[in-house]
Image: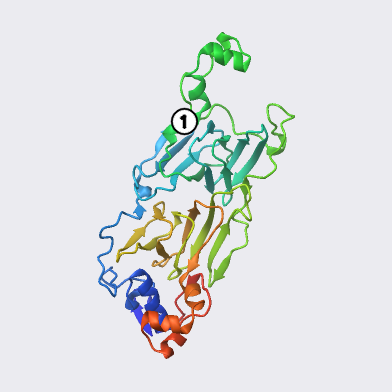
Amino acid sequence: MTHRNRQGPWTYPSDFAQLLAALALGISAGVVAPVAAEDGGWTSLSNVEWGAGLPAFSYPFSKTPLKTYDGGTTKQVGTYDFPVSKGMAGVYMTLEPGAIRELHWHANAAEWAYVIEGNTRITLTSPAGKAEIADVSAGQLWYFPRGWGHSIEGLGPGTASFLLVFNDGTFSEGATFSITDWLSHTPTSWVAANLGLTPEQVGLLPTKQVYISRHGPAPGPLANTRPHEPKTGPLELSHVFNLQGHKPLSTLEGSTLKLVTAKEFPASFDMSGAVIHLEPGAMRQLHWHPNADEWQYVLKGEMILGVFASEGKASISKLATGDVGYVPKGYGHALRNDSDQPLDVLVVFNAGDYQSIDLNDWIATNPDSVLGNTFQITPELVEKLPRRDRLFITPAKP
């Protein structure tokens, strides 16, 4: 079976395998190819009206303006802008060398962060009074448990940019508990007593929230950095993970998935994530997650997101670099790269235990009689169905 589109001929190992994929998401077998029909649209066996009766599953975060501070920028997206994202919210932030996202904590959410570019230094304090100070660079991540005190610094050279993902869709940076905001709204005598300063010395402190500032040069080498109290003990578990250097869970013809869960990164017990790289024409096959929502950020390229929401409803969205997608727990979906350039997408889950049921794996684990009766097809067609899981679907080379 061969389809022709803007990228040329594409062949598939099984006509019916593509038809089955179409049934699961509502995409017709004739356009499961890497590029949509020449008119730019998709058709389905049921002639579904894409998106009818459904919320938007993508948000043009790339078009959200940045707020600028002395030493950095930030923007956020949550249910207030993107109603479907009830389980997670996101913040994009940059820091110049020497700038700091001041000491703060989040009362309603944990923070799972991925560094896109540059170098940062994080500090983290536990309820037991132990600490971790670590440098986190591009391709690496950190995790801060809900309620733990922390800060982020830009190390240089150049600007550091990173994504912060929170496991509460209502999260807002405006509701963060910052140390300068707190102390500037506390009686001066109380602050003086707690910090061991005179009232005059307390008067030198900021009179409002600093949030992001650049008061001095970039910090020195990590090896020379110590807590204010040198006897502070280290955390039992590291809250930093090198995802870039992690072995891919799956690789197929250049497409890869690098996944980190609580198994590999025990500190992140209630969140997990992955970076998916899709070559042109490739698709992360149809699947669903039984235990978690999926928050997506397009790091590079263009992505097609298809979502099946039951009750005969389905949606297809196109996301550009910097845009955000969201798939609620249990919803069938697939990610595709229909462009002629590679696609990199960060996906984050609000569960530490990654679970996925992929279409091919589901098919392979059922008896032939169940498959034949379900799809009302002959044993000959049942024989053509996939027998093992394939994380990625790639068109065969002509």
Q: Is residue 299 shown above or below 100?
A: below
| Residue name at image x 28 percent, y 60 percent | 51
On the picture, is 31 further left or further right than 184?
left
Q: Secondary structure at mark 1?
A: loop
Q: Nearer the viewer, residue 346 or 106?
A: 106
Can residue 376 be seen in this snapshot?
Answer: yes
Q: Residue furthest right?
A: 231
Q: Amino acid at mark 1?
A: Asp
Quarter of the image for residue 171 reads top left
Quarter of the image for residue 24 reads bottom left
Q: Is residue 384 shown above or below 307?
A: below
Can residue 12 be seen in this snapshot?
Answer: no
Q: Position of residue 217 (x, y in %)?
A: 59, 30
Q: Position of residue 177 (x, y in %)?
A: 49, 30
Q: Residues within 10 Å of mark 1 (few under 14, many from 20)?
A: some
Q: Position of residue 124 (x, y in %)?
A: 61, 36
Q: Is residue 22 shown above or below 273?
A: below
| Residue name at image x 40 percent, y 64 percent | 332
Q: Give the image's coloring scheme.
A: rainbow
Q: Which residue is mark 1?
A: 70
Q: Nearer the viewer, residue 218 or 335?
A: 335
Quadrant of image for the N terminus: bottom left
On the picture, is 210 further left or further right than 85?
right
Q: Nearer the viewer, residue 256 or 267?
A: 267
Q: Nearer the viewer, residue 273 or 397?
A: 273
Q: Position of residue 84 (x, y in %)?
A: 36, 51
